[in-house]
Image (cartoon, rainbow, N blue to C red):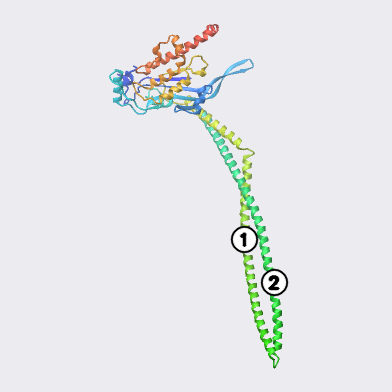
């Protein structure tokens, strides 16, 4: 459905409203809070329309608002048949053509001279597009303005829905966090368990190596001790022998030589004895250092194991709590929750927009509004919303001119594009060729007449078709 809205100029002269198509806008005084008039239309696309998906994928630079639409749904109970309201998703696409900045007086003069064929006209100004609610506020002169607010029940219901949406968002966020943490913690647990196993294996290997080295040192010391004992025996033997020889009163030459040899041998033995003692001292020192290093390594090993066990307990506890919160859910469940959250937020936003539109109004209502059928109406003759959307996109590239390319001409261009597919049918039904052409200057008042005729001609075509298909039913109606 297309809702066409028309605000006529609010200019006054001698306390009388000037509704003339051209003089009204020209005489409107901004200082007196008067408006030049405005025209817009709101195209509603519900889920039945082929263009709904087109807008859902990409707004294409149009003024799109998400909302809900109410459709009649047939209900049959026993022998009773009636209709009930059914809410469906919808988009409301507003086409409201405004100048981004106020046209200068020079530009207006050039456009006026162009109308008289005395010049080429100005280049216009950049356009901007507005929503219907904003248009109502812009057109508000304070005389016919209205402000209707939501009732408390609607606000409370909307607030409760937002709270439930928030709870769903928190659930999705918590589940996503738990699933991500679960993966990380499981990897960390595996790494820490492997690290602990490696440390324990390294600890066993280190202990075995320490025992082996201690045994080797003890064996070496035992061997040196045996050597030292052998030296002591030899020393005792040579000392006794030397003592015996030195007691001879008159030793002969041979005895003297033997005494000297024994003394030399003793010196050698003492030197060997000292070397062995030094070697044993070094072995003792090395063993003490080895034991000290082993104690330090053991302490470091125990600290590492302790830290790993603390970390393992931390991750195991967190993983247990996360699994309790996850409660068997996985990534697929997360995507379902996210999808449900996205859907509910979308519906809540649409409901909020629907309530604002239906239960809250601020500004001045249009002087005239009429509805034109689109494809989802089920009628044979309608305004093609796809063609209208295409024309709306093209309007983004046009410059605004108060006289030569204003809001009225922009709206009319879009609607003409929307009825191009039934142009022949309209002509055959008596619509003049001038109906399909743009006037040099389009005015709100002139457009009102044109829009009413379009509505009437569409109704006539659809009625004639219905009459031709079922004349008896039409006659009875």
Between residue 173 and residue 286, name the one nearer to us. Answer: 286
- Say if residue 221 shows up in the picture: yes
List x then y, in percent, for residue 62.
44, 27
- Per the image, label 2 sits on a secondary structure element best described as helix
Q: Residue at x 70, y 82 (%)?
A: 236
Q: CA distance from mark 1 to mark 2?
A: 29 Å
Left or right: 308, with 49 as reference point: right
Q: Residue at x 45, y 11 (%)?
A: 426
Q: Which residue is mark 1?
A: 297
Left or right: 293, with 385 as reference point: right
List x then y, in percent, for residue 76.
61, 17
Looking at the image, tell me whether mark 1 or mark 2 is earlier in sequence order.
2
List x then y, in percent, for residue 455.
45, 14
Q: Residue at the far bottom: name it.
A: 250
Q: Residue at x 67, y 89 (%)?
A: 256
User: Alpha-carbon neighbours of circle 2 within 10 Å: few (<14), some, or many (≥20)?
Assistant: some
Q: Give the answer, above or below, for where 471 lies relative to 216.
A: above
- Per the image, label 1 sits on a secondary structure element best described as helix
Q: Quadrant of residue 303?
A: bottom right
Q: Give the answer, above or below, for where 245 lies relative to 220.
A: below
- The tag on residue 105 is none
Q: Residue at the far front: name it.
A: 254
Q: How many marks?
A: 2
Asked if the residues shown at circle 1 and circle 2 are in contact, with their CB atoms under 8 angstroms apart, the answer is no
Q: Give the answer, above or below, for where 158 lies relative to 49.
A: below
List x then y, in percent, for residue 56.
50, 27
Between residue 31 and residue 122, name the one nearer to us. Answer: 122
Q: Which residue is mark 2?
A: 223
Q: Nearer the viewer, mark 1 or mark 2?
A: 2
């Amino acid at each position: 459905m297309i809702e066409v809205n028309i605000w006529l100029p609010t200019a006054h002269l001698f306390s009388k409203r000037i509704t003339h198509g051209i003089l009204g806008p020209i005489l409107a005084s901004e200082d007196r809070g008067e408006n030049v008039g405005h025209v817009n239309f709101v195209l509603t696309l519900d889920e039945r329309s082929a263009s709904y998906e087109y807008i859902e994928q990409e707004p294409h630079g149009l003024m799109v608002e998400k909302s809900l639409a109410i459709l009649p749904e047939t209900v049959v109970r026993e022998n009773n048949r009636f209709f009930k309201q059914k809410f469906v998703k919808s988009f409301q696409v507003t086409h409201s053509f405004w100048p981004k900045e106020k046209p200068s007086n020079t530009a207006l003069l050039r456009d006026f001279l162009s109308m008289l064929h005395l010049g080429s006209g100005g280049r216009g100004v950049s356009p901007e597009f507005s929503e219907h609610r904003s248009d109502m506020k812009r057109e508000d002169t304070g005389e016919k303005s209205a402000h209707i607010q939501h009732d408390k029940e609607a606000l409370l219901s909307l607030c409760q829905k937002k709270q439930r949406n928030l709870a769903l968002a928190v659930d999705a966020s918590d589940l996503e966090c738990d699933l991500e943490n679960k993966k990380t913690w499981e990897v960390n647990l595996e790494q820490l368990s492997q690290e602990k196993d490696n440390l324990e294996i390294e600890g066993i290997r280190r202990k075995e190596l320490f025992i082996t080295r201690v045994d080797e040192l003890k064996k070496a010391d035992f061997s040196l001790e045996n050597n030292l004992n052998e030296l002591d025996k030899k020393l005792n033997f040579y000392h006794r022998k030397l003592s015996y020889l030195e007691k001879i009163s008159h030793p002969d030459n041979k005895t003297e030589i033997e005494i000297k040899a024994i003394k030399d041998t003793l010196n050698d033995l003492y030197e060997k004895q000292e070397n062995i003692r030094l070697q044993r001292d070094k072995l003792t020192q090395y063993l003490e250092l080895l034991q000290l290093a082993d104690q330090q390594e053991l302490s470091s090993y125990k600290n590492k194991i302790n830290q790993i066990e603390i970390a393992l307990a931390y991750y195991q506890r967190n993983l247990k709590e996360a699994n309790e919160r996850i409660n068997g859910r996985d990534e697929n469940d997360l995507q379902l929750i996210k999808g449900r959250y996205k859907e509910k937020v979308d519906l809540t936003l649409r409901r909020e927009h629907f309530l604002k539109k239906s239960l809250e109004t601020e500004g001045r209502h249009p002087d005239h509004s009429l509805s034109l059928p689109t494809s989802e109406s089920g009628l044979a003759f309608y305004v093609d919303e796809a063609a209208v959307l295409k024309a709306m996109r093209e309007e983004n590239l046009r410059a605004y001119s108060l006289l030569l390319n204003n809001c009225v001409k922009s709206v009319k261009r879009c609607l003409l594009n929307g009825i191009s597919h039934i142009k022949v049918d309209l002509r055959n039904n008596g619509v003049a060729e001038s109906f399909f052409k743009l006037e040099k200057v389009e005015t709100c008042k002139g457009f009102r007449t044109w829009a009413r005729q379009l509505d009437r001609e569409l109704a006539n075509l659809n009625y004639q078709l219905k009459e031709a298909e079922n004349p008896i039913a039409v006659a009875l109606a």
